Image (cartoon, rainbow, N blue to C red):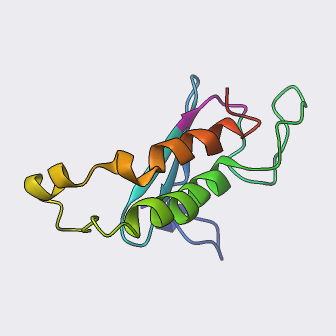
Amino acid sequence: LVGSLAPKGEKGGLHSVRTGAGTLHNFETLSGLRIAMYTTNDVPNTASSNTDRRGSDIGGVSVRDALRYVYTDLWVESVVKSPLYRPGEMSEAAAKSFDIASTQFEKRLDAYLQSMPWFR
């Protein structure tokens, strides 16, 4: 359904859902991993809008670009390339032996998000 509603020439997919309270941004990888972030409505989902509803500059990085960076530069580099990570094979026993904290993913994620001008 979402693919049939996408504009011509654009790849279908659900990128964000906006409500009166906020926006849920979504990034889905080819492997099916989904990364989501909930923000206020004045944070841009795409790079074409760099101002909030009051016209104030809120930075040049969109949430979509940030979520892509989280996957490609943080998740892949920190977790996927870890020798202990076994995609698709994370049984309960394997999950106990793999501690995501040992990959520095959470620390790097926190530092990256706090550097975003729209992160409060």
Inspect the magenta stretch and tell me whether residue 60 lies in it.
no
Q: Residue furthest front?
A: 102
**Placement of 105 over or under 75, stated as above or below:** above
Q: Residue at x 81, y 54 (%)?
A: 48
**Residue 67 left/right relative to 106:** right
Looking at the picture, tell me which residue is in the foreground, 3 or 48: 48
Does the image show residue 87? yes
**Placement of 40 over or under 61, stated as above or below:** above
Q: Residue at x 41, y 54 (%)?
A: 103
Residue 37 lies, in percent from the top left, at 52, 40
The C terminus lies in quadrant: top right
Identify the magenta region: 38-42
Q: Residue at x 37, y 45 (%)?
A: 101
Q: Residue furthest top?
A: 21
Residue 97 lies, in percent from the top left, at 18, 54
Residue 39 lies, in percent from the top left, at 59, 32
* Quarter of the view holding residue 116: top right
**Residue 15 left/right relative to 51:** left
* Quarter of the view holding residue 31: bottom left
Q: Residue furthest bottom?
A: 9
Secondary structure, magenta segment, majority class: loop
